[in-house]
Amino acid sequence: MTSTITTEDYQAFRLFLEEVSGIVLGDNKQYLVTSRLTKLMKEHDVHSFSALMGRIKTDSRLRNRIMDAMTTNETSWFRDVYPFDILKEKLLPELAKQRPRKVRIWSAACSTGQEPYSLSMMTQEYLQSKPGSLAADAVQIIGTDISPSVLAIAKEGVYEGVAVSRGLPQDRKSRFFRKVDKGWAVVDDIKKRVSFRELNLMQSYTLLGRFDIIYCRNVLIYFSTELKRDILARMARSLNPRGYLVLGGSESITNYSDDFDLIRWRNGVIYQLKS
Ligand SMILES: C[S@@+](CC[C@H](N)C(=O)[O-])C[C@H]1O[C@@H](n2cnc3c(N)ncnc32)[C@H](O)[C@@H]1O
C-alpha cells in the first residue's frame, strides 16, 4: 500500500473531483488527497492511486465515499449568528406582510442539517413573538447537499458531543431538543417544516421550485469562477421576485453576478434580486 501520489494521478484526481462536484483543488494539495483517502483505500483494498483512479470509473459506491472524504462538511448551529438574526428580525417580518401563507427557504449545501434546523428554530421564535403574522405552516425549509452521508444525519436530526454543542446556547438546546439514547434529537415542531434531498449544485434546480430566500453558505469558495457565476445565475432564476440570497461570511457576488442589489443591515450584507 502506497500513500504517495504521482503528479499524473494527482492531475487525474483533480479533474475527476472538479467534474463530479465542482470542487477545485489547488496545485499542491497532494497531501490533502493522500491524508483524506489513505484509510478509505485500505478499507476498499485499493493499493495505489492509479488503481483508485481505475476503480472509481465503475464503482459508484466508492465514488460516493471519495466525495464524502473530499468535501468539507464543517458546520455549526447558528453559524455566524447574523444570517439567523436577519431572518427573524428583517426577512420574516417583511415576507409576512407580502406572502403570509407561504414562505420557502432553501439551505443549499446544508451539510448535517444545523443550518436548516437553525433557520427553523428562528422561524419558531419569530412565530412565537408575532403570533398570527404568518400561517402556522407557512414556512417551508428545504436542505440539500451532494453528500448522502451528511444528509442521512440531517434527516435523522440526532446529534451528540461536539455536534450538538457547537454554537448552540443552553436555552435553545432545552427548548428545541430532547434527550434520546443516541444524543439529542431536534423536536418535531422544528423538524416538521424542514425536508432534505440530495442535490449537486452543478445540476438543475428547477424541480425544487421557487424560493423567497436562498442560503448558500460556505460552499461557493470551493468552486471555480465559472461555476460560481453559473450557480449564482441559476439561483437568481430560482428566486421569487425580490427574493433574498444569503452567502457565507467570506463570500460575495462581486465579479460573479449582476442580478442582485446589496442590502446592508446592521454590520453585514445580504443580497436581493433586482426588480
Ligand atoms: C462547509 S459545508 C457548509 C455547510 C453550511 N452551509 C454552513 O455554512 O455551515 C459545505 C457543504 O457543501 C457540500 N457540497 C460540496 N460540493 C457540493 C456540490 N457540488 N453540490 C452540493 N453540495 C456540495 C458538502 O457536502 C458540504 O456539506
Image (tube, rainbow, N blue to C red):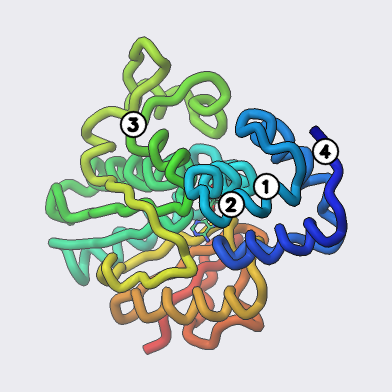
- The residue indicated by pointer 4 is 3
Name the residue located 70 percent from the left edge and 47 percent from the top edge.
Answer: 51
Assess disc 4: are there few (<14), some (14-19) or many (≥20) residues with their C-alpha within 10 Å of its C-alpha: some
Label 4 or label 3, whichever lies nearer to me, is 4
Q: Secondary structure at mark 4?
A: loop
Q: Of the residues under marks 4 and 2, which one precedes in the sequence?
A: 4
Residue 60 is left or right of residue 228, and the answer is left
Count of picture labels? 4
Q: Earlier in the sequence, mark 2 or mark 3?
A: 2
Q: Are marks 1 and 3 in contact (CB under 8 Å)?
A: no
Q: Position of residue 193 (x, y in %)?
A: 23, 45
For image coordinates 36% across by 65% down, the residue present is 213
Q: Position of residue 249 (x, y in %)?
A: 62, 58
Q: CA distance from mark 1 to mark 2?
A: 6 Å
* Numbered disc 1: secondary structure: helix
For marks 2 and 3, give the CA distance. 29 Å
Q: Which residue is mark 1?
A: 52
Where disc 3 sits, the SS reads helix
Is 268 located above or below residue 156 in the figure? Answer: below
Callout 2 amino acid: Ile
Crowd class of label 3 (few under 14; some 14 to 19; many from 20; radius 10 Å): few
Closest to the camera, between mark 2 and mark 3, is 2
Q: What kind of residue is marked 1? A: Leu
